[in-house]
Image (cartoon, rainbow, N blue to C red):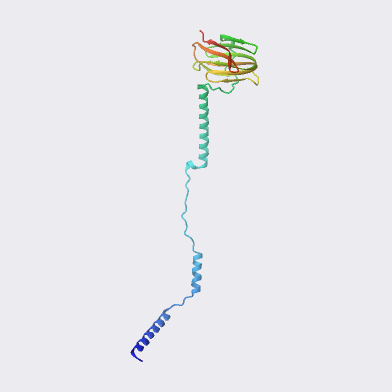
Amino acid sequence: MNERDNIETSLWEQIERQFDRERSAAVEVDLKKEILNQINMESYKQPPKKEEIRVVQRFWSRPAFKLGFTFAMGAFVGFLIFSLLNVNLIGTDNPAPEMKGTLYDSRSFDNMRTADVLQYESPLAKAVCNVRYSAKVVELRIELSSLYPVKSTLEFDFNNFEVLNVQNVQVNDQSTAMAAANFVQINNVGDNKFIVQLYNKNSLPHQIDFKIYQYDSPIYQNSVQVNKE
């Protein structure tokens, strides 16, 4: 055996001794048990606990506050609309709904001063407008009779007069009365009676125009003056 063979033999002997040392130092491991333990640990591992989020409800976002606020806003808007409609009725010429009832005691009519009695008569229509006044009230008693629809108006300056009441004394279903800031309108068919009361704002002489229309064409027009003295 030559020297090269001796070196190779010695090298393999060293390798075998090293393997023997590694075997003696190695610890036996139950691979199946280790895998099962690892699986159990993974399955029972709890997820991290999430931080609890607390929602603090503001006072104005609570249902009771929202309901109360909605009710208050509805009442305010309703009052505002009513106020605007009331201003529009007083400040414009748009007719108001039919008015009934007595807002002023009319029993003193006989004691009022007489302004004038306006009369109109034709084969198709008849009208009598008796006008009296006091320091506070102007009262007009109107009798209308017509076979066909006619429209009668009382027109005045709203700075001098204000409508207190329009009362249907004797009226059928085909007649209506409407009032606005500066006029009263009566739509008439048949025989009817009306009482119109105006607030007399001052003691200065003022005119009230009485007109009758048939199919929107004037058939009668006259004026009466109150506060003559």
Camera-nearest residue between 216 and 56:
216
Residue 10: x %, y % from top left: 36, 87
- Residue depicted at 49% across the width and 69% down the height: 38
Q: Is residue 156 above or below residue 4?
A: above
Q: Relative to 121, is 75 above or below?
A: below
Q: Quadrant of residue 167?
A: top right
Measuring 53% from the left and 23% from the top, which residue is drawn there? Answer: 89
Is residue 105 among the parts visible in the rendering? no
Position of residue 75 relative to residue 206, above or below, is below
Horizontally, residue 161 falls left or right of residue 146, namely left
Give the percent coordinates (x, y) of residue 100. 60, 21
Q: Nearer the viewer, residue 123 or 38?
A: 123
- In the current view of this chain or complex, which residue is farthest to the left? 3
Which percent across, then down, holds residue 50?
47, 56
Residue 142 in view of the camera: yes
Q: Residue at x 49, y 74 (%)?
A: 31
Task: Tell me the quarter of the image containing the N terminus.
Answer: bottom left
- Count the marks: 0
User: Residue 189, percent across and down?
Assistant: 64, 18
Specify whether 172 is left or right of 112.
right
